[in-house]
Image (cartoon, rainbow, N blue to C red):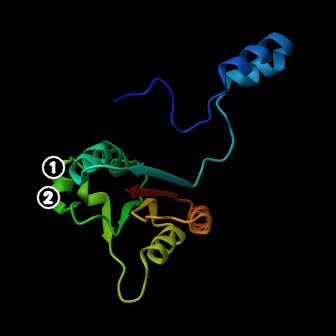
C-alpha cells in the first residue's frame, strides 16, 4: 500500500496553508517546504483481533523496517509466540537484519527495550508492551533519543 504523502513529516492543514498563502508570501513559501522539526522518537500501534490477522497487518511495516538502509539492526523485543522464524521468512522480512531478544531472569521487557534503545545499535526497537503507562512511554522516548533510534510499541488488545 502506498501513501500519497510522506509519513515522516507533519502535514500543514489545508485551511492553514490557504490562509498563509493569502496573507503572507513568506509563509506561503514556508508552507511548501518540508517540516524541519525533530522526528518523533516513540510511536505506538494498537491492534485488536485474531493474532494471525494482527500479524498480517504488521508484516508490511516490519518488512519495510527490516529493509531499512541504516546499517543498524531492527530489534524485536519479546514478540508474541506466533511471531516465529518461519513467520518472518514467510512475511518476506530480511532476517539477516533482525535481532529477536527476550528478557532473562528478573529483567523486564521494558528494561530490555530501554537498554536496546540506549545502546544505539538498532535503528528501530519494536516492543510488545501492553499496557504502556505514560511514564514508560517517556522513558522509551528518552532512551530512543539517547541512542538516536526509533521506538515502536505494538499494543495487542
Q: Residues at badges 2 and 1 in contact (C-beta under 8 Å)?
A: yes
Residue 129's place in the image compared with 112, above or below, is above
Residue 124's place in the image compared with 9, above or below, is below
For this rendering, which residue is in front, 47 or 67? 47
The residue identified by callout 2 is 86
Residue at the extreme top: 22
* Residue 97 on image: x %, y %: 31, 58
* Residue 146 on image: x %, y %: 61, 66
Tag shown at residue 90 = 1
Q: Residue at x 24, y 57 (%)?
A: 95
Q: Quadrant of the C terminus?
A: bottom left
* Residue 122 on image: x %, y %: 44, 63
Tag shown at residue 78 = none
Q: Residue at x 43, y 79 (%)?
A: 108
Q: Residue at x 30, y 47 (%)?
A: 63
Residue 115 horizontal side relative to residue 93, left or right? right
Q: CA distance from mark 2 to mark 1?
A: 6 Å
Amino acid at each position: 500500500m502506498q501513501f500519497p504523502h510522506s509519513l515522516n513529516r507533519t502535514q500543514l492543514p489545508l485551511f492553514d496553508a490557504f490562509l498563509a498563502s493569502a496573507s503572507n508570501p513568506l509563509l506561503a513559501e514556508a508552507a511548501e517546504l518540508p517540516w524541519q522539526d525533530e522526528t518523533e522518537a516513540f510511536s505506538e500501534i494498537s491492534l485488536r483481533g485474531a493474532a494471525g490477522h494482527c500479524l498480517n497487518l504488521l508484516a508490511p511495516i516490519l518488512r519495510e523496517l527490516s529493509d531499512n538502509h541504516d546499517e543498524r539492526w531492527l530489534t524485536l523485543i519479546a514478540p508474541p509466540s506466533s511471531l516465529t522464524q518461519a513467520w518472518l521468512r514467510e512475511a518476506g522480512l530480511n532476517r539477516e537484519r533482525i535481532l529477536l531478544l527476550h528478557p532473562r531472569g528478573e529483567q523486564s521487557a521494558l528494561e530490555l527495550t530501554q537498554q536496546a534503545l540506549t545502546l544505539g545499535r538498532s535503528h528501530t526497537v519494536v516492543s510488545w508492551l501492553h499496557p504502556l503507562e505514560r511514564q514508560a512511554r517517556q522513558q522509551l522516548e528518552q532512551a530512543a533519543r539517547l541512542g538516536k533510534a526509533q521506538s515502536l510499541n505494538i499494543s495487542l488488545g
